[in-house]
Amino acid sequence: MSLFSDVPQAPPVAVFKLTADFREDSHSQKVNLGVGAYRTDDCQPWVLPVVKKVERLIVEDSSLNHEYLPILGLPEFRSAASKVALGDDSPAIKENRVGGVQSLGGTGALRIGAEFLRRWYSGVNNTATPVYVSAPTWENHNGVFADAGFKDIRPYHYWDAEKRGLDLNGLLDDLEKAPEHSIFVLHACAHNPTGTDPTQEEWKKIAEVMKRRKLFVFFDSAYQGFASGSLDKDAWAIRFFVSEGFELLVAQSFSKNFGLYNERVGNLTVVAQDSDNLTRILSQMEKIVRTTWSNPPSQGARIVSKTLNCPELFAEWKDNVKTMADRVLLMRDQLKTKLQALGTPGTWDHITQQIGMFSFTGLNPKQVEYMIKEKHVYLMASGRINMCGLTTKNIDYVAQSIHEAVTKVQ
Amino acid sequence: MALLKSNKVIYCLGNISPSLGALSIRNSSWWGGVQMGPPDPILGVTEAYKRDTNTKKMNLGVGAYRDDQGKPFVLSCVRKAEAMIAAKQLDKEYLPIGGLGEFNKACAQLALGADNEVLKSGRSITVQTISGTGSLRIGANFLSRFHGGPRDVYLPKPSWGNHTPIFRDAGMQLKAYRYYDPSTCGFDFKGALEDISKIPEQSVILLHACAHNPTGVDPRPEQWKEIADIAKKRNLLVFFDMAYQGFASGDIDRDAWAVRYFIEQGHTILLSQSFAKNMGLYGERVGGFTVVCNDAEEAKRVESQLKILIRPIYSNPPMNGARIANTILNTPELRALWLEEVHGMANRIIKMRELLVAGLKKHGSSHNWQHVIDQIGMFCFTGLKPEQVERLTKEFSVYMTKDGRISMAGVTSGNVGYLAEAIHAVTK
């Protein structure tokens, strides 16, 4: 009798199952608009030119070895990463109250942050402290906080399906009604999956309520630079909150903006009230890291660190990022134009109003099923598409498929 | 009340008196109650070593291999593999949650032997993990969620310091079985068997596959057989931690003998593997976690649940190190080169053990230092007491952990004489 006879088969993670199904599909016109990874106009993965350059430098540097990084990660990486989020002239950095924990991607940063909050936020043992995630949100947010021990994970209003935009009133209302000290996970830019971000004025309103209600700010920043093409613009919300005096956490990912998906490069930026608090916080972060992965992987951090800390490479990187952002903007523009030209029912302005990698098309589950089964266009059941999966070669087919789905399936 | 931390007092006062509350708002932080965490006992040794200005200082703390010049050693097979990989211009797309499939297969084959019936029947699952720590943590999380037996994990006494917090953070409880005999600086076989025979059924027992950390004391094959037997009788769930395959004796098959024997005897084991030491891939975080199941169907179910555990920690593992390890294991010339280099590392350690004992004898030490030679792997449990360790550090700038453990990898032909002198000085 096995000790594991009762282990149930777990459902596959939806987004990866989608890609697996896509791979098995032999249809010549198949399109994958599922998982969030950048693709070129030839629908190929893109290793950023600056990354290739830096990797060569690393391989050729015989003084480099494979020794353990410190528990909190590569120091030059951590400081440069936090600087990218908070800005070169960040007062918080100057005041020595900003620290970083190098993590395994954005997921790793979120998890370490969540583990820390559960242990140390608002007294100790915060299993009952409510954690609010947007409705909808990246599906893994729930898992991260649940597995970190939080028992009360709630949605906050975010996506207004009817008007296809931000439900600001619903959001503000949830903030007003949330118990004090609740934790809120905010998407810094390029909201996943909706692509809908608050405007600066809306962020100001959100911040005002959060400060008044003593709510905790945990930013998820997976697309800095990728959303608008400008690092500073995409970090505006984070920097505004910091300037308003919030102590906060930012989970940063360099998977998309550096194209370093499989190297697992992330950073948990901690903005504390002062350096004494920061020191104690980081010492506890170390304990959490030590029982999770001991110390983080070095390759990806080296690449990012070298790039961010060298002016020419940094400039080249910004350029590469803009290339990606611009292609996405072009695809948004073209998709909307084509849908309008086809006379597809409904309004399609949201395609160009939304920002970042994803678009919440508004297609319902039945229409999504049609897209996948009949047209071999793969997208998430939520109607989310990855704009990067669109190319000048397949956009007509996709627009046509959407048109059919909307007109044939209700 | 007097013992309350000042921040808590301010918080309490803030609730009672509004004016004091205003004070607390001005000065309060979310994190006022966060205590300073203690420095990591092992990594803290290196921190202290770095600060020391004595030119003769020795870092015998953390277990990272050093060559005879005391320098980190990047294996040639690793450099060659890296060059091969660079030439291929591969992309950086996400790995599957369970990691690089080819690597997982090679990792399992390395541990179990390529012709192991377990692999042929597909009744095991191996996932790529963040080196040994990540592997143990995934295993601990899996046990915590799915193990129907007692929550207790039995560790050898002593064990690697990080085992306890890993299992604890995963929600398991820790107990111990006797292992190290301080009077012989060897294996307390009788004590181990006695304790293991009393472990409640279905409990988890953790065994170090080879090169026990921190003692360097391994059971002999006949002793392993008895342990396997009693563990079977007690219906224990065996969890092997194998962080030093190849590094202990120099022979990868020999070092995996216990793991393979247990499987042969019918144990459906859990296994953590690390490539940090045997491939020198420390910072690349390469490891594997294996669950041997009853059949392929069960293995599939277990795999699906491992993915559910992994996804909310780090989504999917890092590619670089796994690609290097995979290239080495699957390229015949590189694999042969690797086996040679592992053999070389193990041999250098063995030589240092011999030189250390010879040096101690030369200084006229009256103690029996045979255990230094009998123990195996990177570490040596010297038998030194905390006061002696402190003297070694303070008077001789020899850095090691308080339990008397030294990393032989930090010993070179250039400094072994000094070390012998120092140890003799504090023990005579």
Image (tube, rainbow, N blue to C red):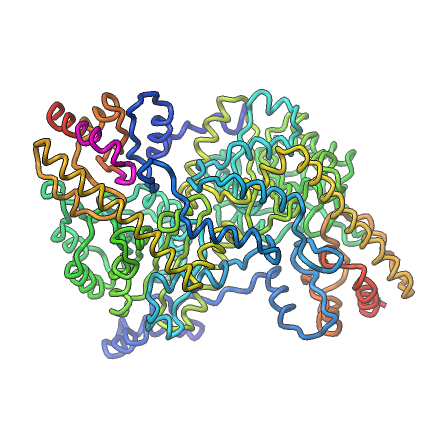
> Residue B130, percent across and down?
52, 45
Relative to residue B50, is residue A131 depicted above or below?
A: above
Point 37% across, 70% down: residue? A93
Residue sitting at 55 percent across and 64 percent down?
A: B39
Quarter of the image for the N terminus of chain B: give it.
Answer: bottom left
Q: Nearer the viewer, residue B298 or A372?
A: A372
Quadrant of residue B210 within the rendered picture: top right
* Residue B40 position (above or below residue B338): below
Taking depth in this image into account, of A5 and B420 the one nearest to the observer is: B420
Residue A120: image x %, image y %?
A: 39, 60
Residue A347 seen by the camera: yes
The answer to whether A319 is drawn above or below residue A214 in the figure is above
Dominant secondary-structure state across the stretch colored magenta: helix
| Residue A350 image offset from top left, x and y in percent | 14, 43
Q: Which residues are magenta?
A: A386-401
Instruction: Describe residue B340's horizontal placement relative to residue A105 as left or right.
Output: right
Residue A391 lies in magenta, yes or no? yes
Picture coordinates of residue B58 (x, y %)?
A: 72, 65
Q: Considering depth in this image, is B182 or B425 the residue closer to the camera?
A: B425
Q: Is residue B316 left or right of residue B166?
A: left
Residue B59 quadrant = bottom right
Residue B191 visible from this viewpoint:
no
Residue at figure coordinates x 57%, y 30% from the top left: B105
Check residue B331 for magenta coloring.
no
